[in-house]
Image (tube, helix red, strand yellow):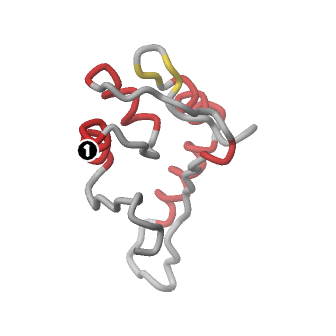
Amino acid sequence: MPYGKWYIEYGHGMGKTLGFADEMNAYVLLDRGTWLARRDQLRLVQLLAGDGLLDNPYHIISINPDKHPGVNTQAAQRFIEWMTSKRGQDIIKNFTIDGEQLFTPAGNP
């Protein structure tokens, strides 16, 4: 065991992992969306949130057309431009579950 007997690698998606942690009264690291969607069904309580060490940034890149012919590079570029635009970032910022912000936009577009 690389981490010790206390560590359990469950090997399922976030929802099942959260349910398992709740049954075991265990600690678990998970994404904010899963927590917000399921917290009312759990005995677990949130201990830590908002620390930059827990950031889980998403990235968007276009596929290299030289390596993957037939890729719609123009559409990919339009999507990237929209996602990184003020409007796209505002949509990300304003997406909430029960009034709580789910994602943090990526700076100033």
Residue farthest toward the bottom in the current orientation of the protein: 67
Judging depth in this view, the residue of 45 and 66 nearest the camera is 45
Residue farthest toward the top in the current orientation of the protein: 99
- Quarter of the image for residue 28 reads top left
Q: Quadrant of the C terminus?
A: top right
Coordinates of residue 84 in the picture (x, y in percent): 62, 44
Residue corresponding to mark 1: 20
Coordinates of residue 25 in the picture (x, y in percent): 33, 37
Q: Quadrant of the N terminus?
A: bottom left
**Relative to 11, is 41 above or below?**
above
Residue at figure coordinates x 36%, y 36% from the top left: 34
As drawn, is 80 to the left or to the right of 69?
A: right
Crowd band around label 1 with a 10 angstrom C-alpha radius: few (<14), some (14–19), many (20+): some
Judging depth in this view, the residue of 23 and 33 nearest the camera is 23
- Quarter of the image for residue 24 reads top left
Judging depth in this view, the residue of 59 and 53 nearest the camera is 53
Residue farthest toward the right in the current orientation of the protein: 108
- Quarter of the image for residue 16 reads top left
Amino acid found under the numbered disc labelled 1: Phe
Coordinates of residue 106 in the picture (x, y in percent): 67, 42
Residue at figure coordinates x 37%, y 42% from the top left: 26
Residue at figure coordinates x 46%, y 22% from the top left: 96
As drawn, is 29 to the left or to the right of 42?
A: right
Element carrying mark 1 = helix
